[in-house]
Image: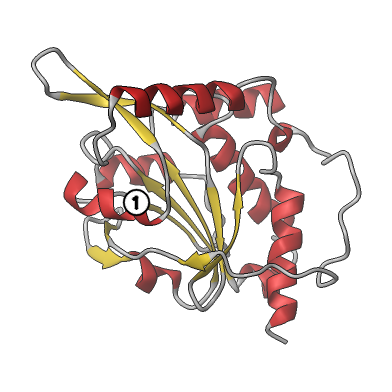
Amino acid sequence: MKKLLILILIMISHTSFSESDIEKERNLIKKERTDLAIGWRDNLGYELPQAGSYKLFDVRKSGDGKVLLPNGDLDSLHNLMDNKITLLSFIYSNCTDTNGCPLATSVFYKIQEKLKKNKKILSKLKMISLSFDPKFDTPEVMALYGKGLSYIDADWDFLTTKSYNDLNPILDDYDQPVIRKYKNDGSYDGVESHLLRVYLIDDKKFIRNVYNVDFLHPDLLINDIKTLLLDNE
């Protein structure tokens, strides 16, 4: 079942860099691509501290920007966060790196699955999957990507942007590295690679945690979400 989920997610699935920058990013990405990530496991493998027994401090203010909804309407990232606790991931639909976009999508799916009987928490959670490949990931493509993934009670948006001019400032604000491919004639040819990052953003739009492939597990994220909710009580 787990292998099937991975296969399904793979199937549906900014600025310019100098040569040295690109090589550094490639090396970082290689380090993250080892064995199957913990997010694919059912069990985290260790006991988490009780929710609310620890603090998640502000990392920085989250970035805003213009985004496109699956129906093609223009909106802003901050407006869509809707004063909820938000999980934000950057993906692209044809990513084939098992520990990349398919992992982020799988973890989001598992989070809503684990919270489906806890509608109080689910109602206060927003999940956003934002493409960093607007040329290929049109609103229609993102609608297709998200079809069947989001539960009725879950608030999960699959977004893209109108252009790289709209996308690049967002990537810069979130410090999200992505390496793009170009043909010999200089024309864009898709995403080559990226670092997996998922951002936990509170209801005041401050980033409170950033997860990489080594810490991206639904149980850990749910624990942090509960901790933020307890902070608000």
Instruction: Say above or below: 34 vs 160.
Output: above
Relative to 178, 183 lies left or right: left
- Return the x and y of residue 165 as percentages of the image width and height: 17, 50
Residue at position x 50%, y 45% in the image: 148
Residue at position x 25%, y 41% in the image: 15
Residue at position x 81%, y 68% in the image: 54
- Return the x and y of residue 172 as percentages of the image width and height: 34, 51
The number of numbered discs placed on residues in the rendered structure image is 1
Instruction: Say above or below: 48 vs 93.
Output: below
Q: Is residue 151 visible?
A: yes
Q: Quadrant of the N terminus?
A: top right
Q: What is the quadrant of residue 212 in the picture? A: top right
Q: Quadrant of the C terminus?
A: bottom right
Q: Residue furthest right?
A: 47
The residue labelled by disc 1 is 172
Q: Is mark 1 on a helix, strand or loop?
A: helix
The type of residue carrying mark 1 is Asp
